[in-house]
Amino acid sequence: MTTFDPAAPLAAAPDPWHETDAPSRRSAPPYHMTDMIAAEPFVAERVLARFADPQGPAGRLAGAIGQATTSGTPVIVTGCGTSEHGAQGIALMIREALRAGGLPSGPSTVLAAQAFELALDPPTGGLVIGVSHEGGSVATIDALEAAADGGAKTALITASAGSPAADAAGPDLILETVELDHGWCHTIGYLSPLLAGAATGAQLSGSPLDPGIVRGLLATGARDEAGAEKMASALGDASTLLIVGSGADRPAARELALKIEEAAWLPSTMRDLETLLHGHLPATDGSTGLVLILTDRDGRAERVDRARQALTAAQVIGLRAGAIVSRDIDALIDSDLTPAGRLVVDEAPELPTPVAALIGSVTPLQLLTERIARARGTNPDLIRREDPVYRSAADAAG
């Protein structure tokens, strides 16, 4: 096996563009996913450097966002799957940056939407930002085209400006992250759009991001391999997993649920922290796993109090609970409430709150996913498409 250098740039999308081939199959770790997690701190520095110029694509997108919001028209960020979760995170980052920059920033100003639904009900103005790592998602392309037909400006965050999705976006509003994921269980494909969103937010607020802080946050989040293995051992044979989040941690919770299903083939679902306690617990028992993600600094006292109550209820039933939490929150919640263990995220107070939460949880949630896949004996890279049945299912779904 060729030695992987995590500091070396990843290959760009094919030119001319075409859908990526199946990743090479590895029979044991390190998987491609393992490599991508190791590469993410270095990818982050390069992506942020690419978007640091105020006259560059992130600066132009920031200008388009400012123009839309000051004119009273919406900004909608859209995508599918992992890209949809990236879009949800980007919307939170942009909203916070608008607030910091003294621009209109209410909940209806910047929204996230699922691409298929947006294509069926597009806006008649404003700005639509598509997110598609490889640039081939049909629903996202349809959403961008429908938005443009309705009179909205369109933009795109993608690894390839030569992709089909790029043809549906305004040519001056394409943020090309360039480096392409090596596996189909997208890790770089989740991080890269979040970085593009953070860089755009920095242009809006006028507060540059320090790439070194972002790199360190990602590196620290991937460091606790023993903790991830402990959690994977406790959760790997669960009947189902509930992934719980609140505030800026909700996109990460959705992404963890998707990642575990793709990589480890373990049924998982996301629940908002409060929603979990309104009728879902009767379906759980000692075979159910739970992972709480809680890193958001906003509303922290209230979120921690409600999380304690949720974890206490889970303890009464006997759920296998673990958590991904920030360092300060780790000290506020009794360790007995998370018998499956914890992964602890740095606070990164120098970063805007949603940026710190969303970037900080990237590598821990991916590391946990990869270790659950190992515990279950699954290969995370191919999202089960090495099995002819699941390959046929993917083909049937288009």
Image (cartoon, grey):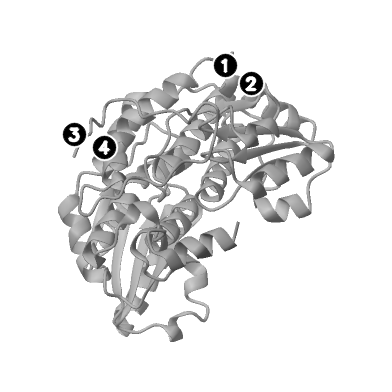
Q: Is residue 372 above or below residue 106?
A: below
Count of labels in the image: 4
**Dots 1, 2 in contact, CB < 8 A:** yes
Q: Which residue is mark 3?
A: 3
Q: Earlier in the sequence, mark 2 or mark 3?
A: 3
Q: Is residue 388 above or below residue 221?
A: below
Q: Nearer the viewer, mark 3 or mark 1?
A: 3
Q: Amino acid at mark 2?
A: Arg
Q: Residues within 10 Å of mark 3 (few under 14, many from 20)?
A: few
Q: Earlier in the sequence, mark 3 or mark 1?
A: 3
Q: Which residue is mark 4?
A: 219
**SS of the residue under disc 1:** loop
Q: CA distance from mark 2 to mark 3?
A: 39 Å
Q: Amino acid at mark 4?
A: Ala
Viewer-nearest residue: 29 or 287:
29
Q: Amino acid at mark 3?
A: Thr
- Horizontal side of residue 348 vs 338, given as left or right: right
**SS of the residue under disc 2:** helix
Q: Which residue is mark 1?
A: 56
The answer to whether residue 233 shows anywhere in this view is: yes
Q: Which residue is mark 2?
A: 60
Q: CA distance from mark 3 to mark 1?
A: 35 Å
Q: Residues within 10 Å of mark 1 (few under 14, many from 20)?
A: some
